[in-house]
Image (cartoon, helix red, strand yellow):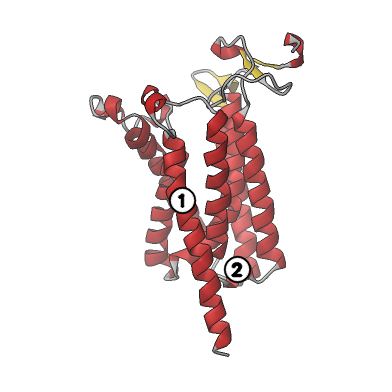
Amino acid sequence: MDFLSFIHWDVNPELFSLGPLSVRWYGLMFAISFILGYNIVEKMFKHEKENLKWLDSLLMYIVIGTILGARLGHVFFYGWEYYSQHPAEILMVWKGGLASHGGAIGVFTALLIHSKLITKKNVLWTVDRVVVPTALAAMFIRLGNLFNSEIYGVQTSLPWGFIFERNGETVAKHPTQLYEAGAYLITFLLLRKLYWKTDIKSKTGMLTGIFFVMVFAARFFIEFVKENQEAFEANMSLNMGQWLSIPFVMIGLGLILLAHFRNKNSGSDK
């Protein structure tokens, strides 16, 4: 394979800087995802004539749940050996280290609290709507990982392999950030179509179940060509990302079945 056929990637993760303040591509992707997510959920609430006053608090809960969950997920799932010895660094998010599985747990916990305190609705009603823009947000976050030249794959001879020169790489690696971003974009487009073109939103838990299955099944399989994030994963039959994805896929399948049979039984009573 001709060396020049690969993609040479040496993008500066900083978009621009103003004195001591720097704006990074990753932060920009994060911000865009929340702005778009807010607008998408707002349209849903208007369509269903729900209380728009819930939106601001919903955004706050999601932001806090995402950041805390993703950070604690990284600490406990991937870096406990280090952070148990350096507990003061656990909340130093700016030093890097977020885990998507922890983020999912954090968001669900935040939405559970929000549902209990604010909307007084079944938490799955809220989650069914939030997962639609969440899939899009996951795509933007993986694009942010690409700009950071992080979380990429093992060596490949495929022509779309990326040589991450900023990290000192000299061989092409799978751009697994783009693989995941593509899978999440497909998930978003499907969920969006299902929400607006079908009555699936009336089947509580169905959209959430589809989201879990599609996102975490994609994550499970893509991990096979992704480099391990931590040294301890080298001796594992499946890496940490895969082990953490399995329960989410199982929960997703359970939610789909539960929503299906609940809807079937309610229909038979009419």
Does 86 appear above or below 192? Answer: above
Tell me the amino acid under the disc marked 1.
Phe
Q: Residue at x 58, y 90 (%)?
A: 270
Q: Residue at x 63, y 67 (%)?
A: 46
Task: Give coordinates of residue 105: x percent, y percent.
Answer: 41, 49
Residue placed under numbered mark 2 in the picture: 201
Q: Residues within 10 Å of mark 2 (few under 14, many from 20)?
A: some
Does 54 appear above or below 7? Answer: below
The image quadrant of residue 237 is top left
The answer to whether residue 45 is visible is: yes
Residue placed under numbered mark 1 in the picture: 248
Q: Residue at x 68, y 47 (%)?
A: 186
Task: Give coordinates of residue 230: x percent, y percent.
Answer: 40, 25
The answer to whether residue 57 is visible is: no
SS for dot 2: helix
* Image position of 3 (left or right of 93): right
Task: Give coordinates of residue 141: x percent, y percent.
Answer: 57, 36
The quarter in which the N terminus is drawn is top right
Task: Give coordinates of residue 169: x percent, y percent.
Answer: 58, 11
Residue reaching furthest to the front: 237
The image quadrant of residue 225 is top right
Q: Residues within 10 Å of mark 1 (few under 14, many from 20)?
A: many
